[in-house]
């Protein structure tokens, strides 16, 4: 279970990187389902997941956490990561659709 927490930590770093790149405008406009408009949600969720996983990771590596606590932390971090990614995807997709529909009548 410690390795799962380590993988979730790396996933949080990846989500934070993509969110920051989207927030800074370094990604193409259509990449990752409009991550520009959903980037703040992705950044906030990734930071929360990263901080929680980094708080428990040293104790998990030292095998000082019980199985129940470690399982709860892993599930919590996974839910926060998945929820923020889904919310960013939905926000980005809806903003992209709104932007496309506003340009349909333009020549």
Image: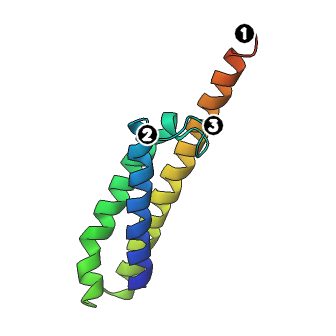
73 to 64, vertically: above or below: above
Q: Earlier in the sequence, mark 1 or mark 3?
A: 3
86 to 61, vertically: above or below: above
Place of residue 16 in the rendered image (x, y in percent of width and height, measured from the top left)? 39, 53
Camera-side residue of 73 and 47: 47
Circle 2 SS class? loop
Camera-side residue of 28 and 85: 28
User: Residue at position x 57%, y 50% from top?
Assistant: 86
103 to 3, vertically: above or below: above
**Residue bearing mark 1:** 106
User: Residue at position x 61%, y 42% from top?
Assistant: 33
Inter-mark Cα distance, 2 to 1:
27 Å
User: Residue at position x 52%, y 43% from top?
Assistant: 88
Inter-mark Cα distance, 3 to 2:
18 Å
**Residue bearing mark 2:** 26
Q: Earlier in the sequence, mark 2 or mark 1?
A: 2
Dot 2 crowding, Cα within 10 Å, few <14, some 14–19, many 20+: few
Q: Earlier in the sequence, mark 3 or mark 2?
A: 2
Q: Which mark identifies residue 93?
A: 3
Inter-mark Cα distance, 1 to 3:
21 Å
Place of residue 31 in the rendered image (x, y in percent of width and height, measured from the top left)? 58, 43
- Which mark is nearer the camera, 3 or 2? 2
Which color scheme is applied? rainbow
Circle 3 SS class? helix
Camera-side residue of 54 and 23: 23
């Amino acid at each position: 279970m410690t390795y799962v927490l380590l993988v979730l930590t790396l996933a949080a770093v990846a989500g934070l990187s993509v969110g920051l790149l989207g927030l800074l405008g370094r990604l193409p406009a259509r990449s990752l389902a409009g991550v520009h408009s959903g980037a703040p949600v992705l950044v906030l969720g990734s930071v929360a997941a990263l901080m929680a996983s980094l708080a428990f990771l040293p104790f998990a590596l030292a095998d000082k956490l019980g199985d129940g606590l470690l399982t709860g932390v892993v599930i919590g971090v996974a839910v926060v990561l998945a929820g923020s990614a889904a919310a960013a995807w939905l926000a980005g997709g809806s903003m992209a659709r709104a932007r496309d529909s506003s340009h349909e009548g333009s020549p």
